[in-house]
Image: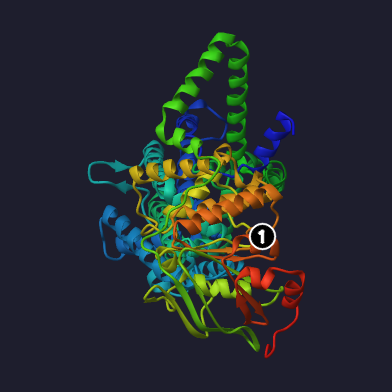
Amino acid sequence: MSLTGQRKADAAHRPAGLAPLGLAAVAIVVFAALPVYGIPRLTLNLAAEACLLGIACTGINLLLAYGGMLSLGSAGFLGTSAYTVALTTSHWHWPLVPAILAAIALTMALAVIVGFVLVRLSQHYFAVAYLGLATAFAGLIAAYPNATNGTSGMTTLRVLGLGFTTVQSNLGWYVVGLVCAAISLAVYRWAVAGRRGRIFKLVRADDLVASVLGVRTFRARLGLFVLASFFPALAGALFFPFEGLITPDSVGAIESVQLVALVVIGGVGYSYGGFLGALVILWVQALVDTAGNYSLLVYGLVFLLCAFYLRAGIGGAVSDAAQRLRRRAAVRRARHAPDGEAVAARGRAAERRVDDPSVARAHSERDGMSVGVHGERRNLEITDASRRFGGVVAVDSVSLTLEAGRVTALIGSNGAGKSTLVNMISGVERLDGGRVSLGTQDITALGAAQRTRLGVARTFQVPRLVEDLSVLDNVMLGREAGEGTVWWRSAAREREHRETALERLAKAGLDELAQRRVSTLGTGERKFVELVRALDEEPSVCLLDEPAVGLSLGEIEQLQEWIVRLRDAGAAVLVIDHNLDFVQRLADFVYVMDVGRIVRSGPPQELLGSREARGALLRPAEGAA
């Protein structure tokens, strides 16, 4: 692929993410100064409203980009906060600041209850249910006119008393909006920084793999949902005194959908995307208000143009333009740099690589990946394990032992129940009967996350990696996903994980892939990256499901060397594969599975040592169902 073609491919696969801090700082300064540039129809009042709408959109952006949850009901939380301020100040005469704080706290508490139900739903059901709640909330407000004035809404003076000052002017409201927008951006960046952002993207991309790696996925989703409610809660608490009016129509389904549209136009995943979308749409709306009957037509065309030509939103277009400028500047510097300086720079880089002990040690071991074992050597035993799906018996009273320091192979035809058995061992599937024990500990009742923490790791038939993260980030997840709550984060610990992951990639000969997006990798590369991730926690039991599928002969030989080293380190290794030559060379003991049962077992030389023996494996054993 040419350099231009590679750049286009990288751009196509580049996920929406956080803007570099420098770009974000420039965007904030430009945004703050826009009303003073004399742009037609762009007033301080409009800019303040864009700030408040942008704050509400930030929560939607967070849920969509890092949780994969389409938030079609955020206006309901905005309304909850706004009506709380309205009721506490109008009926109970609370000061405004305590009312705002109480509204945010009440809204987030409500989000815990709502999220406990909604985050269990799949994507489209979540979106529909959330939209239904927003609609129901608007109807509930209208149904109690004695308290809320019904459809007429509640009114107040356009004044914000802060104790040390009183905000009344458009400039004052704009300053308040900017300050609260800065707080929102800081909270957003804190929420998705480092380990937290990687884990949220892992849960969004593949709930199953996240569980296997040790993430408590429900807690992670619920925590993200509750945190996301903070943004519409803050916006709603300020909207009531800013507008001086709140009605049921302004917090229903239509407003919720409009907020989502602002995020999409501004750029999903960009921290400032909601603010850009709100500013542009409000400004365009102000411009076309004088167009009379054509205003809706112009307004709709803006949405269509963004949908067709700005797939990553305005934020994506800004980010891409900035990256193109940086690349052009780098090319110009390279062209004009003296040859001596370029050679000297390469020499300094080489010296740094040599002087780094971890990198030097890693490169000296590139021919084979060193592995360790989590804790003491332990056997894993499955006793009379059974699993049924309706009337189909997938696993029927299976017993086998995975001994520490031994490679055990499980072979059989498609549909024999092998993958289901691995799912049962790893905790992905529950047992209908039987027992799973690790050493002397019964782990039958433990989930996948708990078993991973005990040292049970696995790979999948098809590599399951986070497409829009780098190889390095994916490998880091193998160690950090199961470390406590998702909200805990240590910069020093992350640096340690990063160095360890880089060292392991270098030992595996994959260090050149470290900064590549997974979406640009081939099948073999993905297989090895997933294996490095699985081994990063130094498991005592490793379950490899079809590890040789899609690999070249050279890659299979390298894989075999890795597994032998893992066995020699004391791990109990289970390999499922249809490549019988690979199994015969690698395995110390073989189980043959057919129609959910173990029908044969023994040394590989006995079961696979001749063509006749292999042919016998294709015939059902006596007594097999």
30 shown above or below 453: above
In x, y percent, where is residue 595? 68, 82
State which quadrant residue 113 falls in.
bottom left
State which quadrant residue 570 falls in.
bottom left
- In the rendered image, the residue lying farthest to the bottom is 623
In x, y percent, where is residue 247? 47, 62
379 shown above or below 20: below
446 shown above or below 307: below
Q: Is residue 526 left or right of residue 78?
A: right
- In the rendered image, the residue lying farthest to the left is 164
Few, some or many residues within 10 Å of mark 1 (<14, 14–19, 20+)? some
Residue at the (54%, 58%) spot, across then down = 204
In x, y percent, where is residue 515? 55, 39
Location of the N terminus by quadrant is: top right
Residue at the (47%, 73%) spot, across then down = 117
Q: Which residue is mark 1?
A: 582
Is 80 in front, or is 452?
452
Residue at the (64%, 76%) spot, across then down = 592
Location of the C terminus by quadrant is: bottom right
Is 543 in front, or is 580?
580
Tag 1 secondary structure: helix
Check the image and tell me how it is coloured: rainbow
Query: How many labels were placed on the picture?
Result: 1
In x, y percent, where is residue 324? 62, 28
Does the rendering let one see residue 270? no
Q: Is residue 55 left or right of residue 516?
A: left
Q: Is residue 314 left or right of residue 369?
A: right
Is 67 in front, or is 244?
67
Residue at the (49%, 23%) spot, across then down = 349
Q: Please, what is the three-letter code of the amino acid marked with disc 1?
A: Phe
Does the rendering let one see residue 440? yes
